[in-house]
Image (tube, coloured by chain):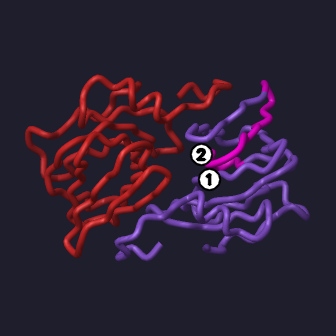
Chain colours: A purple, B red
Amino acid sequence: MNEQSLHPVNLLHKASSIDTQWSPRIVAEMNDYQFKVVRIEGEFIWHSHPETDEAFLVLEGELRIDLPHGQVFVRPGELYVVPRGIEHRTAAASEAKLMMIEPRGILNTGHEGGERTAQNDLWI
Amino acid sequence: MNEQSLHPVNLLHKASSIDTQWSPRIVAEMNDYQFKVVRIEGEFIWHSHPETDEAFLVLEGELRIDLPHGQVFVRPGELYVVPRGIEHRTAAASEAKLMMIEPRGILNTGHEGGERTAQNDLWI
C-alpha cells in the first residue's frame, strides 16, 4: 500500500481479484509484517514456520486448519493464530478467501518447500 | 488467546462485549504484536506513534482517520495502515467497532499522553 494513500484496502475485493488459488498477494505492510490475501480450495500441505506465529482472518467461506491436536474451523470475521513451530495444514471444502499476517519473507510452505511453494513478494 | 485453543476469535462478538468506548481490549497475540478490538464514537485526540506503524481493520460502522494530508474513511472489511510518526486522529460519527494491530506495549495516545490514555494490557 502506498502509505500516503487516503484509500483503505478492501480485503475481499483484493482477494477476489487474484487469478489463481493458493497464490498469496500482499495488500499492505506494517513495519516488517505483511498483510496478504489468498483464495484457497482443497488441502494444502503440512508445514510449520519455526521462526514465527501466523495469523489468519477469514473474509469469505470457511477455513479449516488441521493441527496436531485437532481441527479449527474459522468463519468470516474470525481470527486464528497458529503458534510458531506448530505443524499445520490449511484447507477449505469450497473456496475460502483469507487474509494472512506474517513477517516479510515468509514462505507459504515454511521449511517444507516443494511444488506448492508460492512466490512471496507479489502485490495486488 | 490460549495458543492451544481450537476456537477462533470472533472479532465483532469480542468488540461488542466491551463495556466502554475507547477502551481497547487484546484478543490475540502474534509474536510481539497484539490484536485489539475497540468500540469508538466521537473524536479521539491527535497523536502519533514514532516507533511503529498501526493497522486498523473495521468490523462495523465507519471509521474516519484524520491525517495531516486528508481524511480516510474505512468501512467494514477494509484495512488501513497509519505509518509510524504520522499524526492522526481516529473518529466515528456513530459507534464503530474496530480491530487494531500494533506491537505489545503501545499506548493509544502515543507519546501524547493525557486523560484519554487507556490501560494497554487488558484482554477480553
The residue lying toward the viewer, choosing from B41 and A67, is B41
| Residue depicted at x 60% and y 65% | A14
Q: In which quarter of the image is residue A40?
A: bottom right
| Alpha carbon distance from label 2 to label 1 | 6 Å
Name the quadrant of the C terminus of chain B.
top left
The residue lying toward the viewer, choosing from A41 and A122, is A41
Q: In the figure, B2 relative to B39: above or below?
A: above
| Residue depicted at x 78% and y 39% | A87
Q: In the figure, A95 relative to B48: above or below?
A: above
Question: Disc 2, disc 1: CB below 8 Å?
Answer: yes
Q: Is residue A61 magenta?
A: yes
Residue A57's mark?
A: 2
| Residue depicted at x 73% and y 49% | A96
Residue type marked 2: Leu
| Residue depicted at x 30% and y 46% | B106
Q: Name the residue carrying label 1.
A: A100
Q: Name the subunit of mark 1.
A: A
Helix, strand or loop for disc 2: strand
Residue type marked 1: Met
Q: Where is residue A91 in the image (x, y as percent from the top left)?
A: 81, 44
As drawn, which residue projects farthest toward the right?
A: A115
Please report whichever mark, 2 or 1, sits nearer to the chain's N-terminal start.
2
What residue range appears in magenta? A49-70
Q: Classify 10 Å Cα crowding around label 2: few (below 14), some (14-19), many (20 and above).
A: many
